Image (spheres, helix red, strand yellow):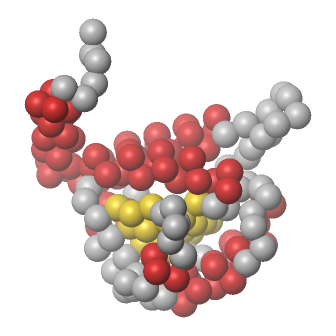
Amino acid sequence: MRALADAGSVLLIGLRNSYPVALHLKQQLQQARGRVRLAPLPGQTLGEELVDVGEGDVVVLLGFRRRPLGFERLVEVCAASGARTVLLADSTARRHASAVDLWIECPLDGVGPFDSYAAAMSLVSVLADGVLAATGPEGRRRVGRAAELYEELEELDLR
C-alpha cells in the first residue's frame, strides 16, 4: 500500500476483461491520491502511455485470464522502465510473477461457467482502503474535497 501511496505516479494497465477492474481501481485510488492514470485509453497505444513512466512510479498490471498476446513483453517492458511493478492476476499469470516487484494472485473461480470478478473487486477495495490509510490526513482531505465537488456539481443522487 505504501508504494502506491508514495509513488510519483501510478499507471494502471488493464487489457480485455482486466480493464473494468483497472478502471475501478483507478476511480478508488484517485480519491486518495493524485496522478493516477489508466491505460490504454481509447485510441491510444501502450507505448504512448508508458513513455513517461520511470523511477519513483508504480505500474500496476492487471492480467486476468485470457490476456492478449504480447502480455509477457508488456510485463518485461514495464519491469525495465525503472518503475516498481505490481501484477494483479489469477493463477494463469503466475509465470510472470518473477518479473515483477509484487505479485498478487486473485482467483476468478465461481460457481457458474463464467469467471467471477467478485474477489478482484473486493481486492480493489482493500488496496484503496490501504492507500487511503497510508496517505493519512492529506488523503482524507482529498476525499472530503471530492465529496464537496460532487455536491457542488450536483453529480450524485444521494436521496
Residue placed furthest toward the right: 113
The location of residue 32, given as percent across then percent down, is: 27, 49
User: Residue at (58%, 53%) from the top-left corner?
Assistant: 19
- Residue 75 shown left or right of residue 150 in the figure: right
The location of residue 90, given as percent across then percent down, is: 73, 54
The location of residue 152, given as percent across then percent down, is: 11, 30
The quarter of the rendered structure image containing the C terminus is top left
Q: Is residue 55 above or below residue 22?
A: below
* Residue sitting nearer the eye, 37 or 109: 37
* Residue sitting nearer the eye, 111 or 150: 150
* Residue sitting nearer the eye, 41 or 139: 41
Q: Is residue 81 above or below residue 15?
A: below
- Residue 128 shown left or right of residue 155 in the figure: right
Can residue 25 be seen here? The reply is yes
Can residue 89 be seen here? The reply is no
User: Residue at (42%, 52%) from the top-left corner?
Assistant: 26
- Residue 62 shown left or right of residue 141 in the figure: right
Task: Name which quarter of the figure residue 110 lies in.
Answer: top right
The location of residue 96, given as percent across then percent down, is: 72, 74
Task: Name which quarter of the figure residue 71 lies in.
Answer: bottom right
Q: Is residue 150 above or below residue 3?
A: above
The mark total stands at: 0
Q: Is residue 36 above or below residue 155?
A: below
The quarter of the rendered structure image containing the N terminus is bottom left
User: Residue at (63%, 61%) from the top-left corner?
Assistant: 15
Residue placed furthest toward the front: 43
